[in-house]
Amino acid sequence: MQKKDIDTRQQKKELRREISRLRKAHTDEEIHRMSLAVKEQVLGLMEYQRAETLYAYMDYKHEVKTRDLIRCAWAQGKKVAVPKVLGQEMRFFYITSFEADLEEGSFGIQEPKEDAPAGDEDALLLMPGVVFDLQRHRVGYGGGFYDRFLEQHPGLTTVALAFEFQVREEVPFEEFDIRPAKVVTERRILT
């Protein structure tokens, strides 16, 4: 491994620790309030309004909350799918109910049952991340699940959800890291 790769990985690791501390420092109420503001930004996006299917993540440990957004999508007649980790890959499955279609999954994150595989290649995919920069480079959690999934599904429109404290002027990135088309925070939309 080259020194540059080691430095990049170390920088990402440090950023993950820093953002984890910042997320923990916010109360549940603050996270919920900021998540509602992110939701309103997403609802105004043309990409969201045109999408018939929404691929969303199930939030975990003070990420931008997605349940209110999923409820809006259902109310508007959109199909919704959420991810399940299967070994080293991630696949999406449709859900129509939080109570009936989700179970405890990998890393303690709620995941869908494997009843209804999603196959829409023109869906809007909402993705999480640890930290983003102004050019939409993304530092994820280190598993590479979204990068591998998006390599196999290049037709999906991608929008990352983040809080303003997760945005930096620039972050370390590697060539294989896939940038979302937009990053939406409670205050702005990066394109």
Image (tube, rainbow, N blue to C red):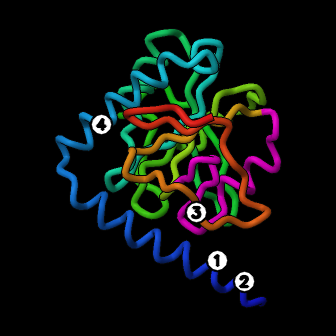
Res 172 label: none
Q: Residues within 10 Å of mark 3 (few under 14, many from 20)?
A: some
User: What amino acid type is highlighted by mark number 3?
Assistant: Val
User: From mark 4 to mark 2, how far is it between C-alphas?
Assistant: 36 Å
User: From mark 1 to mark 2, how far is it between C-alphas?
Assistant: 6 Å
Q: Residues within 10 Å of mark 4 (few under 14, many from 20)?
A: some
Q: Residues within 10 Å of mark 2 (few under 14, many from 20)?
A: few
User: What amino acid type is highlighted by mark number 2?
Assistant: Lys
Which sits in the foreground, 31 or 185? 185
Check disc 2 and report its element: helix, strand or loop.
helix
Q: Are marks 1 and 4 in contact (CB under 8 Å)?
A: no
Q: Which residue is mark 1?
A: 8
When asked about the image quadrant of residue 55, the answer is top right
Q: Which residue is mark 4?
A: 34
Residues shaded magenta? 132-155
Q: Which residue is mark 2?
A: 4
Label 3 vs label 4, nearer the camera = 3
* Residue 69 is a magenta residue: no
Q: Position of residue 12 (x, y in %)?
A: 55, 72
User: From mark 2 to mark 3, how far is it between C-alphas?
Assistant: 14 Å
